[in-house]
Amino acid sequence: MAGGTSPASNMAFPFGRRLPCDIYWHGVSFHDNNIFSGQVNKFPGMMETVRKITLSRAMRIMQDLFPLEYNFYPRSWILPEELPLFVAEVRMMKDNNPSWKPTFIVKPDGGCQGDGIYLIKDPSDIRLTGSIQSRPAVVQEYICKPLLVDKLKFDIRLYVLLKSLEPLEIYIAKDGLSRFCTEPYQEPTLKNLHQVFMHLTNYSLNIHSGNFIHSDSVNTGSKRTFSSILCRLSSRGADVKKLWSDIISLVIKTIIALTPELKVYYQSDIPAGKPGPTCFQILGFDILLMKNLKPVLLEVNANPSMRIEHEQELSPGVFENVPSRVDEEVKVAVIRDTLRLVDPQKKKKKDTQCQSWEQAGAGEEPPDAVAGAEAALPSLCLKQVFPKYAKQFSYLRLVDRVAALFIRFLGVKGTTKLGPTGFRTFIRNCKLSNSNFSMAAVDILYIDITRRWNSMGIDHKESGNPGMCLQAFVEAFFCLAQKKYKSRPLHEQVALLIEQCECRLAALQGQRLLWGCGLGERPGAPPPARPQRQRVFGLQKPAQLRALVCRDSAGS
Ligand code: ADP
């Protein structure tokens, strides 16, 4: 195992590590070191994907498709480009419901630890505060009625292991942290809007309050375990089982919203069919509980703090790092179990044991030596939730399939943006253009949407590339779906168009296979271009493809 850019790892390998490692533990991102094998604890593009603006956009796409399923994310607008929309929508909602007295929270993009966050009562207050032009931000509906414990607002930090993207594997830690405000909570008024110790639960802010309590116990003080809160809720008669199931569902749905973008980054850094590392990542989910126990997603952290110490002021101006029992209890288990789950030795041992067991012609169950070694360790704190609950959520994975189409037509190795030729080939191969939608209209659609997305100044890996990013492609795809399948709910329109595209591409692939074998009738025109590249996230299901080839060769 090798560390990344952390000071400790630099001390261990001051001149860099020459030999390949099983596991690379990077401090910040996938790109901390060049690696070509083994496993690395970061996914390419994760930091970009969970930034406030990108996350809000990904959630918006899912809210458009599945409004009820994604109502755990507060209504959000992106500044500066959606300021007029924000103003108009708030005005409309107020007109419809004059008793609605909302509060909004403005969060700068890329900020963390509460940096630059402020609350407002009216959209016009945005212009008066700070220069939003220089700092893009998200403005979000503020949850005014959070669940309180000891009259204080708190949030939950849950640790989630994304063990694999394809196939999707998600684990959730059974315990997390609850981080408390340090001033008793009051619903927002013009008078208390600026009181950060009342409204923001960030540890990094509240630690500076005179009221912050460091405690040796996990169920008192300003940072507690989430399990201690659950015990308390359970003793008050709350349905804690339902709460956990809602949290699991929130985590799975959020990751489903993030995977399309992550897959685009992944194929650009780790091309399919080439040797390369595999990735896993520990994510920090920040969740707020509403008074009615409904969990709300605040944000996802790509690099959650794994510190198990806190600073203590021994005498004025003299600080010392002391162990924090709560942090230790939760975080040590998360790191330990992550390493257990990705342990390459375990996999190797298991494979060899299975092999020798099979060679010996024994029954179905291999000997349980691996399980024996495991038994010596504490039971796993990371609980698998996906694929365990995959069936319940598979219908939500529509944008994943749109991303698979996008990736298929990307063409140039290492890119994350689609050029105009790739877009035209997509339209042509999927037979989406017709007398009502000419290729000239296709070009206009491409230019319109791409230009708008590129003018938004989004912090993207390829900001200088004028091509179409995934989210712009998704917008174009939804537009085509709405045009083709009018008057149905959006998710049905999109699902139908995906099916059409996948079928047409499978048929095309079938034809190419037949031509390759010298079978099938070849039309006079030259064959369409060969698929640009084999990719991990291919579209065709082998069985579907075989069926098409059979039908074609039977002449039907
Ligand atoms: P940061 O990355 O700067 O910590 P967050 O999105 O986590 O930004 O917000 C900081 C804090 O603000 C949260 O911990 C939470 O206490 C509060 N907060 C954020 N969004 C909301 C919201 N929509 N409603 C109520 N409180 C919120």
Image (spheres, helix red, strand yellow):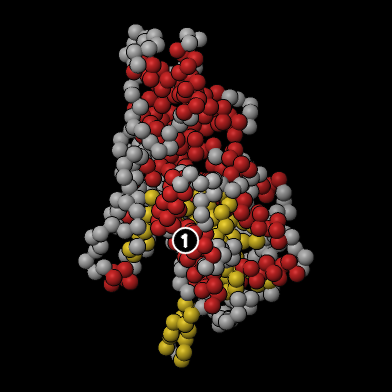
Image coords of residue 396 (percent x, y)? 58, 40
Other-residue count near label 1 (Cα within 10 Å), few / some / many at <14 / 14–19 / ≥20? some
Q: Residue at x 58, y 81 (%)?
A: 215
Instruction: Report the side of 225 relative to 168 (left or right).
Output: right
**Element assignment for label 1:** helix
Q: Front-most of 434 and 228?
A: 228
Question: Residue 167's spot in the image, x, y percent?
Answer: 48, 44
Q: Please identify the quadrant where the N terminus is shown.
A: bottom left
Q: Residue at x 49, y 64 (%)?
A: 373
Q: Residue lying farthest bottom?
A: 315
Kindly tell me whether residue 81 is visible in this rendering. Answer: no
Which one is in front, 196 or 207? Answer: 207
Q: Judge: label 1 CB < 8 Å from ligand 1.
A: no
- Tell which of 315 and 523 is nearer to you: 523
In the picture shown, does residue 216 fall above or below 544?
below
Residue 17, position as x, y percentages in the image: 25, 62
Q: Is residue 451 above or below residue 277?
A: above
Quadrant of residue 110 within the rendered picture: bottom left
Residue occupying the point 37% across, 54% down? 39
Please tell me which residue is depicted at 31% across the width and 68% down the height of the picture: 9
The image quarter containing residue 171 is bottom right
Identify the amino acid type marked 1: Arg
Q: Which residue is mark 1?
A: 340
Q: Residue furthest right?
A: 237
Q: Position of residue 230 (x, y in %)?
A: 68, 67
Q: Is residue 225 above or below residue 358?
A: below
